[in-house]
Image: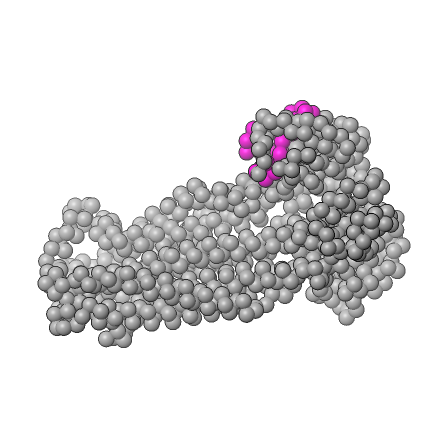
């Protein structure tokens, strides 16, 4: 009996099976990806392959710190690797200064990849050696990909005959994501003469059994004016940065897949309920000839269970290749992604969990069969027509459009289901598209991402306070409308601390500007206002989140060795916590080259930016010209390389999910309404009228669903984005959102028309004969 039911509605069961398979596939892929990334990063950043603490230190720091470390921890191991700070080295890749790609930039000696204090893997090379040969350099792949550096490219040193060939691209644990500070260019020891004119640095690694945070603080407490770390990272710091985007992708995918499966269960329940209503008379007949309620429920349970379980198994298994595809994208700069037995256990969990949930839902939906009696079943249809007529909103409707509106209210449950499916799918799609757009246009909204000024460009001189000649140039330039001075698009070279343990400002970024006038900077504050005098400070929301401080409180801060009390005037969002903002007057006691280093330029006409850039470079060939795009490119490019394909996969799955549901509902409607369509034809209604009525109904419901999706987007997505990334940078862009919605509605309309064409083959005469 149940096999006959499958054959009778095979198309609807196939579509229903595809819907369940998509839901199981996405859930399986996300759970597999989540556990594999967790296990891989745990191994990749384990102490077996990495040291505990890394210092990018000034020259001679290792000799200074080694005897002190032995007194503090006799079992600790300190290893030193020599290098140089090459921010100011005139090294060019094609026509671009390499240090313009990323700052700070270090050149580091490499003798053997296996001797490094962190995991390193050569991913592209024209050599089999374990280190660069003389005249060669190795570049981190994430930097190379962001700036189109390829194996075989040449770096030239301006003013010299030196050339360095890129012979390999590597992945290493110091730079798993673009947001990791700084970058290495690895070179052969024999090429020291090329770099020795620059500031020496030591890359120091420490292995210790002590608490690494305590040891890190101990190292910092022993800094001197000459011996200190320019950058300091623990192994855990590297791991957290490495898993930032993978965690986002995992959470986003798992959340959307759970929502999808919930919607799928609702669809199954509706499908069963609708089947029972359509077969009310048949169920009554079964009972009148002796079939028990349990036997009748078994017919339906077997049909739905067979389709459901098979679809879930297929979908869950298909989730594994999807997991591999997503994993290879997200883990590109950390190593090769592969599946383990942990993924098999996740697939089994998905199959078991979703199957039990499906069976429980089917059973609950079929229980109403027990309430059907043969007498009730024979009465169905006598009063239904009158009841449906009462649901008509437009009385005496004639046009196909007005009849479509009446159909919406006549079949309310079905209409509600279409709205739910379309709302959910377009809501997720709108969120993902605008998230991608927010990442892709970070430079246009930098004030929201990193609380930096919106200036058209930033002018500076390396390792120097703002030179007087540069300031005079800006004041007299016919292109400049206004300007600000201070740290510009970077941060002050000062250390800040707070005695209150609830305020974690160690290694905090310090922003200092001469003014925070909104017209000049464009920086918005979540609460309060920007600092206006030397006794005021503003902090990012993450820093204050778990403290008792708020706007209007006084806070004691130590900057370098100077302690003072500041009034908290504002709170801002930044993806670079922890962060503090002062006016430059508050830092006047410190050397100007530590904080007053850049001029932010607002041009009279932004279209003149290229002309102004050329004029500036001709006037000051040794000074630095930068834009916010240059600064955020290193961050956003690797993010976009992850977000774009992952987003497209999820959107593709949801679009397919939506279309399958639309197809299912149209087929269901066409099958149930065949007699009505035949009667309408007999009364003279044309095929085009009936098709338009069908299409209008689906289109109206889809538009309502889209409107609900856009409303939910406006109400919740900015908050969700801010809660995940701590920045208020989510914006609903009209063009990408409009294109997504427009294309989606066009596709739904085309599918509705194509599936409604079968109405042309309905014959009133045939239906009467049946």
Image quadrant holding the C terminus, namely bottom left
| Residue located at (67% from left, 38% from top) | 505
Q: Along the horizontal axis of the image, is 244 left or right of 669? A: right
Stretch in magenta? 520-545
> Measured along the vertical axis of the image, is residue 493 above or below residue 77?
above
Q: Along the horizontal axis of the image, is 438 left or right of 78? A: left
> Measured along the vertical axis of the image, is residue 704 above or below residue 579?
below
* Percent coordinates x, y for residue 723 in the rendering: 52, 44
* Percent coordinates x, y for residue 196 in the rendering: 88, 51
Which color scheme is applied? Answer: one colour
* Percent coordinates x, y for residue 437 in the rendering: 54, 48
* Percent coordinates x, y for residue 273 in the rendering: 25, 60
Label count reads 0
User: Do we see residue 340 in this rendering?
Assistant: yes
User: Do we see residue 167 in this rendering?
Assistant: no
Q: Nearer the viewer, residue 710 or 349?
A: 349
Q: Quadrant of residue 120?
A: bottom right
Q: Quadrant of residue 599?
A: top right
Query: Is 111 contained in the magenta span?
Result: no
Q: Along the horizontal axis of the image, is 383 left or right of 361? A: left
| Residue located at (58% from left, 26% from top) | 552
Q: Nearer the viewer, residue 744 or 263?
A: 263
| Residue located at (13% from left, 63% from top) | 373
> Measured along the vertical axis of the image, is residue 402 above or below residue 277?
above
Q: Nearer the viewer, residue 571 or 135?
A: 571
| Residue located at (86% from left, 47% from top) | 64
Q: Quadrant of residue 395?
A: top left
Q: Nearer the viewer, residue 373 or 478?
A: 373
Image quadrant holding the N terminus, namely bottom left
């Amino acid at each position: 009996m149940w096999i006959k039911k499958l054959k009778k509605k095979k198309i609807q069961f196939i579509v229903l099976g595809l819907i369940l398979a998509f839901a199981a596939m996405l859930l399986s892929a996300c759970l597999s990806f989540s556990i594999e990334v967790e296990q891989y990063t745990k191994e990749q950043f384990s102490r077996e392959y990495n040291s505990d603490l890394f210092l990018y230190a000034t020259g001679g720091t290792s000799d200074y710190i080694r005897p002190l470390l032995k007194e503090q921890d006799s079992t600790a191991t300190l290893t030193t690797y020599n290098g140089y700070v090459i921010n100011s080295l005139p090294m060019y890749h094609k026509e671009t200064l390499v240090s313009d790609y990323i700052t700070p930039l270090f050149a580091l000696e490499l003798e053997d990849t296996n001797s490094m204090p962190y995991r390193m893997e050569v991913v592209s090379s024209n050599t089999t050696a374990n280190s660069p040969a003389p005249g060669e350099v190795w570049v981190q792949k994430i930097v190379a990909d962001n700036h189109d550096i390829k194996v075989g490219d040449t770096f030239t040193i301006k003013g010299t005959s030196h050339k360095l060939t890129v012979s390999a691209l590597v992945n290493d644990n110091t730079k798993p994501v673009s947001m990791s500070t700084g970058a290495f260019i690895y070179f052969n020891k024999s090429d020291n003469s090329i770099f020795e004119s620059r500031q020496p640095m030591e890359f120091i690694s420490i292995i210790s059994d002590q608490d690494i945070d305590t040891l890190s603080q101990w190292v910092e407490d022993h800094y001197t004016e000459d011996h200190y770390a320019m950058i300091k990272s623990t192994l855990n710091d590297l791991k957290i940065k490495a898993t930032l985007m993978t965690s986002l992708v995992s959470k986003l995918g798992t959340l959307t897949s759970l929502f999808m499966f919930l919607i799928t269960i609702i669809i199954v329940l509706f499908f069963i309920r609708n089947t029972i209503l359509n077969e009310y008379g048949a169920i009554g007949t079964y009972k009148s000839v002796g079939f028990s309620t349990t036997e009748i429920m078994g017919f339906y349970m077997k049909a739905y269970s067979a389709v459901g379980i098979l679809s879930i198994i297929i979908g869950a298994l298909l989730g594994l290749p999807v997991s591999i595809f997503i994993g290879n994208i997200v883990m590109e700069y950390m190593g090769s992604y592969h599946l383990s037995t942990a993924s098999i256990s996740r697939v089994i969990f998905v199959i078991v969990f979703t199957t039990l949930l499906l069976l429980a839902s089917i059973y609950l939906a079929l229980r109403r069969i027990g309430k059907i009696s043969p007498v009730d079943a024979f009465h169905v249809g006598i009063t239904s027509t009158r009841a449906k007529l009462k649901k008509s909103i437009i009385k005496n409707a004639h046009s196909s459009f007005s009849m479509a509106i009446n159909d919406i209210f006549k079949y309310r449950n079905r209409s509600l289901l279409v709205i739910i499916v379309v709302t959910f799918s377009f809501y997720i799609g709108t969120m993902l598209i605008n998230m991608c757009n927010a990442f892709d246009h970070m430079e246009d909204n930098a004030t929201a991402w990193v609380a930096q000024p919106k200036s058209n460009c930033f002018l500076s001189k390396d390792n120097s306070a703002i030179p007087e000649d540069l300031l005079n140039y800006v004041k007299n330039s016919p292109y400049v409308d206004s300007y600000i001075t201070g740290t510009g698009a970077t941060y002050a070279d000062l250390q800040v601390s707070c005695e209150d343990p609830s305020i974690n400002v160690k290694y905090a970024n310090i922003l200092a500007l001469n003014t925070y006038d909104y017209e000049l900077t464009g920086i918005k504050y979540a609460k309060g206002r920007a600092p206006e005098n030397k006794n005021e400070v503003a902090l990012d929301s993450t820093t204050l989140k778990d403290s008792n401080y708020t706007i209007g409180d006084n806070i004691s801060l130590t900057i370098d060795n100077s302690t003072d009390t500041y009034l908290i005037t504002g709170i801002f969002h930044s993806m670079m916590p922890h962060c503090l903002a002062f006016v430059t007057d508050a830092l006047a006691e410190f050397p100007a080259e530590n904080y007053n280093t850049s001029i932010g330029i607002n041009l009279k006409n932004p279209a003149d930016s290229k002309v102004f850039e050329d004029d500036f470079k001709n006037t000051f060939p040794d000074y630095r010209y930068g834009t916010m795009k240059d600064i955020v490119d290193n961050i956003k490019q690797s993010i976009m390389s992850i977000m774009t394909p992952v987003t497209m996969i999820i959107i593709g799955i949801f679009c397919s999910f939506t279309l399958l549901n639309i197809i299912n509902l149209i087929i269901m409607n066409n099958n149930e309404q065949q007699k009505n369509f035949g009667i309408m034809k007999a009364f003279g209604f044309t095929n085009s009228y009936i098709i338009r009525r069908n299409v209008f109904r689906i289109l109206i419901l889809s538009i309502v669903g889209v409107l609900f999706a856009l409303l939910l987007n406006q109400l919740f997505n900015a908050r969700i984005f801010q809660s995940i990334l701590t920045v208020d940078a989510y914006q609903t862009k009209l063009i990408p959102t409009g294109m997504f919605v427009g294309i989606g509605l066009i596709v739904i309309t085309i599918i509705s028309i194509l599936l409604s064409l079968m109405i042309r083959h309905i014959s009133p005469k045939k239906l009467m004969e049946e």
